[in-house]
Image (tube, rainbow, N blue to C red):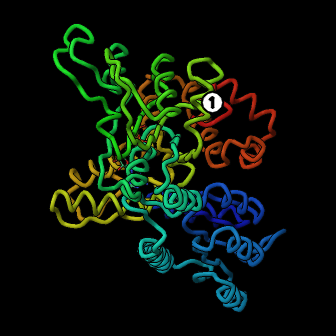
Amino acid sequence: MKKLLIVDDELGTRESLRMIFDREYDIITAATGEEALGIIEGLRPSLVLLDIIMPGMDGLAVLERINEIDKDIIVIMITATKTVKTAVHAMKLGAYDYITKPFDLDEIRLIIKKALSTQDLRNEVKILRAEIDKGYSFGNIVGNTGIMREIFDTIKQIADSKTTVLIEGESGTGKELVAKAIHFNSNRKGKPFIAINCAGIPESLIESELFGHEKGAFTNAYGRKLGRFEMADSGTLFLDEISELSLATQAKILRFLQERELVRVGGTETINVDVRLIAATNRNLEDSVTNGTFREDLYYRIKVVPIHLPPLRERKEDIPLLVNHFLSKIMKEKEAKAKSISSEALDLLIEYNWPGNIRELENIIARITLLSKNSRVFPEDLPSNIRGNAKLNLIKEAVLEGKLSFEKAEAEFERDIILNTLEKTNYVQSRAAELLGISRRILKYKMDKLGIEGTAG
Ligand SMILES: Nc1ncnc2c1ncn2[C@@H]1O[C@H](COP(=O)(O)OP(=O)(O)OP(=O)(O)O)[C@@H](O)[C@H]1O
Ligand SMILES: [Mg+2]
């Protein structure tokens, strides 16, 4: 449901509007302009019904602040007939429309409906514009945030050199995609791109997988076998999850990077290979060095050019682009009719914090495009963990059915709100406390009590 904020100093007005619209919208109310602004900063309602004459900060001043906070929020002024002139002035300042007291319910309902559909249209236009904007992709990598553009630039700059690249990022952030982009934009593109997941191969086999072996090197070594390094000769070798290699294998890779030659397991001959190495990890390699599980010298060898892929929750602006990218990709693959996403559903996707990053987003879009029958994706089509509200409803039901104590439910609610606020403020606790209107000490106390970590992840 869209969020609708009602700002009026008269309790009667607030509550009667709430009663009227309670079923259609998520209603929030504020009695003063100051209170309203606090709510708007934190909750970003879709639409604000704003009384003009209020004690303290008046409606016009609030309107100007709302414009500064977020131009997309639609503001409809509430006015007593006497102040219609001011209402017109308000429209010049950017208010969408005004309604006069006493209210004509049908009229208000219609105005709000129209306003919100205008907003949907505007959102759609925004998505289209962003897509047209050339900067938004590099090969198959979609992204238009500053940090992604920087990564595109880095890829272009280093593609042709032979320098080793270290790609760091949480699971599903696109490490393999970036490795391929480097290869396919380099002068090695006609040559092999060989990938190996170091975590997926037993320790006893990894060395021969990487460097190959001679006939009879060990039991079952019936013939000579080429390793991945040799397969990648004159091309690129992608070592995924490099942190999982044993110290012994790390030493061999270091040697390769220094000498550019290798010896097959059980062999004596040194073989020269021309390989560009790209390594990836979803751990913090520096920590692994501190822990002694990763060689410091190898670490410095491979991190000549580090590329850090941000988690999706840190570049939510890219979500609309990615959603459209996956929608059209999946529809093309399935040769199905085009689907579009409603702005309500898109809002929910933007709010969600994506622990599985882009892979999770891609999977969800694939699932909903196949399951939902409409040509448009609505919130109901989204999985419940993304609908969020659904979670709160579940908790409520559990309490009413006697399955969950009221106290536990309260803690769940608190937890949800605090986590969301922390995410919104990038875990800057002082900002989060401010948004919540509590002191930092109390926030910290609640976090400890609820077992909420002080950092993301
Ligand atoms: N920026 C992006 N634009 C479009 N698709 C992306 C982007 N980033 C990732 N993807 C897609 O998301 C999926 C996961 O990406 P990828 O396999 O490269 O992630 P990863 O970081 O290697 O994950 P893991 O650590 O789990 O191996 C792939 O299907 C990939 O095509
Ligand atoms: Mg990967």
Q: Position of residue 352 (x, y in %)?
A: 48, 47
The residue most toward the right is 56
Q: Which residue is mark 1?
A: 286
Where disc 1 sits, the SS reads: helix
Depth check, front residue: 446 or 219: 219
Decide if residue 337 is on the left or right side of residue 265: left
Depth check, front residue: 238 or 409: 238
417, above or below 22, in the image: above
The residue most toward the top is 219
- Residue depicted at 49% across the width and 23% down the height: 250
- Residue depicted at 35% across the width and 26% down the height: 211
Whether residue 313 is visible to the viewer of this picture, yes or no, is yes
- Residue depicted at 32% across the width and 57% down the height: 326
Give the position of the C terminus as an image quadrant: top right
- Residue depicted at 57% across the width and 74% down the height: 74
Looking at numbered disc 1 in the image, what kind of residue is underneath it?
Glu
Ligand 2 image-quadrant field: top left
Q: Position of residue 87 (x, y in %)?
A: 68, 86
Q: Which quadrant holds residue 213? A: top left
